[in-house]
Image (spheres, rainbow, N blue to C red):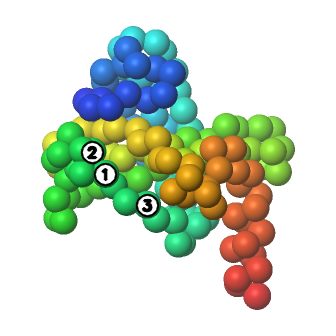
Amino acid sequence: MIFDVKFPIYGFEDVSKVSIEKLEDGFAKLKSEDGKKFVFTMLNPYVICKNYEFDLPISYKALLDVTMSSNIEIYNILMLNSKIEETTINMLAPVILNYDNKTMAQIILDPSQYPFYNPTEKIITFLKQLENNAE
């Protein structure tokens, strides 16, 4: 599925179209379809962090035409490592996908408003929390 980039992915400002390939267990691949070539692996944050939340700024709601009934998904970009303990997730820069109009944007959250999120949070931290909550 191809999406129009309404607000650029940090470091890839010349990309205007991306494709999304959903994988298993909340994972997806984000691939550029023009501009600089890249492929990012992303994860739906709610798979590992049930209480992940942030306010979607009004400007982004307007840019993506997001309403209460919009079919949107949120992902965070992973920095994969051969050891799961070293794989990180950027919780401060969610990717918002609006499936209704095939638009997307990456939001850079203000760390002073979200001091509990980290751009390089080790994914193992969340997996341990899930394991502890299941006990």
Q: Amino acid at mark 1?
A: Pro
Q: Earlier in the sequence, mark 3 or mark 2?
A: 3
Residue identified by numbered label 3: 54
Q: Is residue 39 above or below residue 84?
A: above
* Image-based side of 31 in relation to 105, left or right: right
Q: Is residue 52 above or below residue 1?
A: below
Specify few, some or many for label 3: CA neighbours under 10 Å numbering under 14, 14-19, or 20 or more.
few
Name, please, the residue furthest toward the bottom: 135
Q: Is residue 68 above or below residue 93?
A: below
Specify the quadrant that holds the C terminus: bottom right
Q: Position of residue 18 (x, y in %)?
A: 36, 28
Q: How many marks?
A: 3
Q: Amino acid at mark 3?
A: Phe
Callout 2: SS: helix
User: Distance of mark 1 from mark 3, alpha carbons?
Assistant: 9 Å
User: Distance of mark 2 from mark 1, alpha carbons?
Assistant: 5 Å
Q: Is residue 23 visible?
A: no
Please tell me the numbered disc located at residue 57.
1
Callout 3: SS: loop
Please tell me the numbered disc located at residue 66.
none
Residue that appears at 73% across and 72% down: 129
Residue that appears at 51% across and 65% down: 52
Q: Position of residue 43 (x, y in %)?
A: 54, 50
Residue identified by numbered label 2: 60
Q: Amino acid at mark 2?
A: Tyr
Specify few, some or many for label 2: CA neighbours under 10 Å numbering under 14, 14-19, or 20 or more.
some
Taking depth in this image into account, of 41 and 90 the one nearest to the observer is 90
Q: Splitting the image into 4 quarters, where does residue 20 fall?
A: top left
State if disc 1 and disc 2 touch (CB < 8 Å).
yes
Q: Position of residue 64 (x, y in %)?
A: 22, 43
State if disc 2 and disc 3 touch (CB < 8 Å).
no
User: Distance of mark 3 from mark 2, alpha carbons?
Assistant: 13 Å
